[in-house]
Image: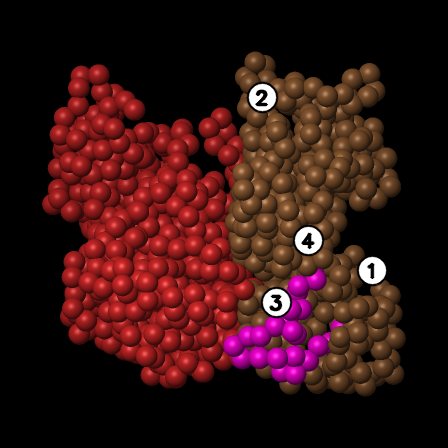
Chain colours: A red, B brown
């Protein structure tokens, strides 16, 4: 692997406090180093912006529901084919791109790490098959725990240590990275066509509440020293008035001791940050939620920003998807997963003229602008729920420029425009803050120490954008900023140039991160025995055939944690 | 080697994915198999029957043994020089092999299609119109109090289906047969129908009519006719009430719906019926897929190209237009000028017009056993039997992935589909490089 010298770029490296200063970056053997030899290849980055490679914390790119969505929506692909080239495979877009195209399109935007945020454990082998096939980027996935029978039973019995050992077993078995909770208890209720809407409602047949499930899993997360917070999609998704449940969910884990990162990450809050009692009177709950986040450091959030375009909704939240399908009357896919979770997919379109869509658009941006600490709010569109990930540059333009936002505000539904606070918010992100919310803060939140920064020892995942920060004022030149972020001048992955002038020039294999918590043998043996005694009752797959072996991952990158269990 | 008993072996016959077989063997030869259904056991018992053991290339009209390298070279040349090759089969091999198949199809600019095209293709087309409310089989086992088999006969096609997943299984919320009702809809009284609480005999090709009537009935609307597709209206209303009144209903359907008059309109009606039922109760629908990895063939092709079957890669990007880009149609129109057949037997299964053209073009076959297709081929490369002599990923009916394991060694010199396809890809690449 040749050495690289990236000369004279304006470096934005928030984790190391470097804010646009001119500096040289040295790369050897896929890592950032202090110095390189004279033989190093020189990339002239003068007049350009240099950032660590983008890190996406929440994007549905792989697994059974993404593939069901692909299968169900040929009309989505036919408009957006991607031809093969000398070094790339062919594929399709648009809202649910095929795997090769997914990797290439992320790389073109300067992203080098992406996490799939919801995988049904029993189908995670499928998720890994797709992750293996996604080129260039590093990745990982979060298994779903919020409706798992074993979890709910341990919670009911109050056996947190055993629950922790079970979670550890499951992370190892599925090669998963973090704990994901979706609509705790609600998907179990969906077995009977019902839902659990509030934090203290009982889960049918299991006699536990979402509050107990969330709290227990947050405690487990802390006991296991997992690298990321518990990643939560609260109850009541998409319902008017759900902002209070979101705040209650955050509040319920406030007393759980925090370690290196917040206890809880609440995701795509745009979908769970709604005030009001009915659809015609939905309002933005963003000010209240932002206020809560600003005054409590145990949580982080991401907005799941809405884009006015065709989208595909996909989530493990089966009941929410059916409720939304009843509104759209498009096509609806549902897939319940035995003893664990569910999934739903619906085709949809967001329109500026639609009152609720316009409010949703406003909630996302209000959250991003009202949460003060850029280390606790991340840029997402909850791809492909709020919009496809390829719309990130557009979101960036709205964040850096009030003018860009105003242009859209002028076109949205008039009632929504009147009811949103967005027009009165003056904050404009700096490039430094953009670098924070798109790579450094997400890498930090995920506990990826070698990502999201350009310090010595970091992975040489680097994005170079054609923006001259001393000359360009993002607030005014938002169009050129948007263009630059859409097509990186260079993307470097593990020290290799993979994108040049927005085109993929080299197809490389990315790694898959997963977590291996070390649990004491005694507790693990006890829990394994309990699993063995119940497994055949709960599953239609034998326990021996359930775990995914490490060799299954083409490039496995386990992160071992020492635990208190 | 001494006697070994391999436990929890995944069966690679139908797509039920039974994974509890016990196989006694000495590493080379299977001694006995336990816990499988009759079909599964006979599959293990007949591993050695009818095997292809040497690569064959047709010279002067006769298939003659040759070396692996020569067979691969000839196969690569056939595919490389073809203008519109079809790469067909895939449902009896691993996802890893299917993945190689897509790569090869992209490389040579061909059409890749799997056996979905002749079984549940209409199911996918129906799903693309209305969606699908489904679940994994364990959910049916735990919750279903109403099971409907429509146009399928699992007692013979998926022998352990009823005992592992439906009426005879024991789940968390349904403990025994008496906790569940079974309805069978078919054109004749099958062995599955004999187990049913209600058997509904529909006239041949009357499924669409009956499904539509059921949709009408569950919406509370009146059916004016006295009978629908040979079924008395009272029976239709009674079945509709059973559907509405159940707590968790599961509808399984087979080729009796997908391959009779109406095809994807039938499946669309069934999918829409189940969707509508979710307004009043919980209901799911699961197609009775046949081969053990036909679901996997759809999955791999979808995540790599966006489309589940009938993918045309001749333009350098994926196109999907069944009827135009589906293997049977393209072959029957006489457009295809070479075929790679992997783990399938189209000469036996395709319609006559398609077989007629197939016999006129060079075929390359990758198969463990002699078949009419292998006999008609230009090149035959013997391959291992997945789940017995080779490991690989497969997908169950319900999309649950499993790893089929290797139990015994393959016959000497016989390679897996993945190895053979790898060699083919390498050879085609070098041929292209030379050009």
Whether the residues at callouts 1 and 2 have beta carbons within 8 Å, the answer is no
Up the image or down, B340 lies above or below A480; here it is above
Chain of the residue displaying label 2: B
Where residue B348 sits: x, y (%)?
A: 81, 42
Closest to the camera, between mark 4 and mark 3, is 4
Discs 1 and 3 lie in a common subunit: yes
Disc 2 designates what residue?
A: B427
The first of marks 1 and 3 along the sequence is 3
Residue B60: within the magenta?
A: no
How far apart marks 1 and 3 lie (CA) works out to 31 Å
The first of marks 4 and 2 along the sequence is 4
From which residue to which does the magenta span run?
B158-184
Q: Is residue B19 left or right of residue B216?
A: left
Chain of the residue displaying label 1: B
Of the pair B353 and B43, the residue shown nearer to us = B43
Disc 3 designates what residue?
A: B164
Up the image or down, B379 lies above or below A120; here it is above
Q: Is residue B127 left or right of residue A369?
A: right
How far apart marks 1 and 2 lie (CA) works out to 44 Å
- Quadrant into which the N terminus of chain B falls: top right
Q: For the residue labelled by badge 4, is the local secondary structure a helix, a strand or a loop? A: helix
Up the image or down, B160 lies above or below B25; here it is below
Disc 4 designates what residue?
A: B41
Up the image or down, A379 lies above or below B347; here it is below
Where residue A382 sits: x, y (%)?
A: 38, 58
Chain of the residue displaying label 3: B
Whether the residues at callouts 4 and 2 have beta carbons within 8 Å, the answer is no
């Amino acid at each position: 692997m040749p050495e690289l010298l990236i000369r004279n770029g304006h470096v934005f490296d928030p984790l190391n406090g470097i804010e646009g200063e001119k500096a040289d970056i040295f790369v050897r053997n896929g890592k950032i180093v202090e110095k390189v030899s004279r033989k190093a290849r020189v990339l002239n980055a003068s007049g350009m912006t240099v950032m660590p490679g983008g890190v996406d914390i929440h994007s549905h790119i792989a697994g059974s529901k993404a593939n069901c969505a692909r299968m169900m929506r040929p009309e989505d692909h036919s408009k957006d084919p991607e031809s093969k080239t000398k070094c790339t495979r062919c594929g399709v877009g648009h809202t649910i791109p095929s795997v090769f195209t997914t990797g290439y399109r992320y790389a073109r935007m300067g992203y080098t790490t992406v996490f799939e945020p919801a995988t049904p454990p029993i189908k995670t082998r499928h998720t890994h098959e797709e992750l293996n096939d996604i080129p260039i980027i590093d990745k990982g996935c979060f298994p779903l725990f919020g409706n798992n029978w074993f979890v709910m039973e341990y919670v009911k019995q109050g056996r947190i240590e055993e629950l922790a050992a079970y979670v550890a077993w499951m992370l190892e078995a599925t090669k998963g990275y973090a704990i994901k909770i979706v609509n705790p208890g609600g998907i179990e209720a969906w077995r009977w066509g019902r839902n659990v809407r509030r934090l203290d409602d009982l889960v049918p047949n299991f006699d536990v509440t979402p509050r107990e499930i969330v709290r227990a899993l947050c405690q487990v997360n802390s006991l296991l020293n997992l690298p990321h917070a518990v990643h939560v999609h609260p109850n009541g998704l998409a319902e008017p008035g759900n902002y209070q449940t979101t705040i209650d969910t955050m509040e319920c884990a406030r007393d759980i001791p925090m370690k290196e990162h917040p206890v809880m990450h609440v995701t795509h809050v745009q979908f769970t940050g709604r005030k009001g009692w009915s659809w015609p009177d939905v309002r933005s709950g963003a000010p209240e939620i932002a206020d809560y986040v600003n005054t409590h450091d145990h949580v982080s959030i991401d907005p799941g920003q809405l884009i006015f375009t065709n989208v595909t909704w996909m989530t493990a939240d089966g009941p929410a998807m059916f409720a939304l399908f009843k509104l759209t009357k498009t096509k609806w896919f549902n897939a319940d997963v035995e003893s664990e979770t569910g999934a739903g997919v619906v085709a949809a379109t967001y329109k500026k003229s639609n009152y609720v869509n316009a409010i949703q658009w406003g909630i996302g941006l209000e959250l991003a602008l009202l949460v003060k600490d850029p280390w606790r709010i991340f840029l997402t569109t909850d791809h492909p729920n709020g919009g496809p990930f390829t719309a990130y540059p557009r979101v960036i333009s709205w964040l850096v420029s009030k003018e860009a936002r105003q242009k859209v505000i002028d076109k949205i539904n008039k009632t929504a425009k009147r009811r949103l606070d967005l027009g009165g918010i003056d904050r404009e992100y700096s490039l430094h803050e953009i670098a924070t919310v798109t790579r450094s803060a997400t890498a930090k939140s995920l506990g990826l120490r070698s990502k999201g920064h350009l310090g010595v020892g970091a992975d040489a995942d680097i994005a170079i954008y054609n923006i001259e920060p001393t000359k360009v004022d993002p607030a005014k030149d938002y169009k050129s900023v948007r263009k630059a972020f859409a097509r990186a001048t260079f993307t470097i992955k593990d020290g290799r140039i993979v994108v040049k002038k927005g085109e993929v020039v080299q197809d490389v294999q990315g790694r898959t991160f997963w977590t291996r918590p070390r649990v004491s043998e005694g507790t693990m043996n006890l829990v394994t025995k309990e699993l063995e005694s119940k497994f055949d009752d709960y599953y239609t797959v034998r326990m021996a055939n359930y775990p995914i072996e490490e060799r299954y991952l083409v490039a496995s990158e386990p992160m071992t944690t020492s635990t208190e269990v | 080697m001494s006697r070994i008993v391999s436990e929890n072996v995944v069966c690679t016959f139908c797509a039920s994915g039974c994974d509890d077989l016990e196989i006694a063997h000495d590493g080379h030869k299977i001694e006995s198999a336990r816990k499988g259904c009759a079909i599964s056991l006979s599959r293990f018992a007949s591993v050695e029957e009818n095997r292809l053991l040497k690569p064959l290339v047709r010279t002067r009209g006769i298939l003659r043994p040759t070396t692996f390298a020569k067979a691969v070279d000839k196969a690569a040349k056939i595919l490389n020089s073809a203008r519109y090759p079809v790469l067909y089969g895939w449902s009896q091999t691993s996802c890893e092999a299917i993945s190689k198949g897509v790569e090869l199809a992209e490389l040579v600019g061909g059409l890749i299609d799997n056996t979905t095209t002749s079984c549940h293709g209409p199911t996918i087309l129906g799903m693309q119109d209305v969606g699908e409310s489904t679940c994994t089989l364990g959910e049916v086992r735990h919750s279903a109090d109403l099971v409907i088999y429509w146009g399928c006969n699992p007692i013979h096609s998926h022998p352990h289906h009823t005992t592992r997943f439906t009426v005879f299984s024991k789940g968390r919320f349904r403990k025994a047969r008496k906790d569940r009702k079974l309805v069978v809809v078919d054109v004749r009284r099958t062995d599955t129908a004999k187990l049913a609480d209600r058997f509904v005999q529909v006239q041949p090709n009357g499924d669409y009519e009956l499904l539509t009537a059921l949709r009408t009935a569950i919406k509370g609307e009146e059916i004016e006719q006295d009978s629908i597709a040979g079924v008395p209206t009272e029976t239709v209303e009674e079945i509709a009430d059973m559907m509405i009144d159940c707590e968790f209903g599961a509808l399984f359907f087979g080729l009796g719906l997908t391959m009779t008059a109406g095809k994807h309109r039938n499946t669309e009606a069934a999918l829409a019926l189940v969707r509508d039922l979710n307004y009043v109760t919980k209901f799911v629908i699961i197609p009775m897929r046949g081969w053990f990895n036909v679901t996997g063939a759809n999955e791999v092709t979808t995540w790599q190209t966006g489309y589940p079957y009938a993918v045309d890669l001749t333009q350098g990007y994926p196109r999907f237009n069944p009827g135009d880009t589906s293997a049977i149609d393209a072959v029957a129109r006489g457009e295809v000028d070479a075929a790679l057949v992997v783990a399938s037997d189209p000469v036996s299964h395709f319609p006559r017009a398609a077989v007629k053209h197939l016999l006129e073009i060079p075929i390359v076959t990758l198969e463990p056993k002699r078949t009419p297709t292998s006999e008609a081929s230009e090149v035959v490369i013997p391959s291992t039997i997945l789940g017995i002599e080779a490991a690989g990923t497969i997908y169950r009916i319900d999309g649950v992935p499993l790893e089929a394991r290797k139990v015994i060694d393959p016959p000497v010199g016989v390679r897996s589909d993945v190895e053979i396809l790898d060699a083919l890809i390498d050879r085609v690449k070098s041929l292209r490089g030379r050009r």
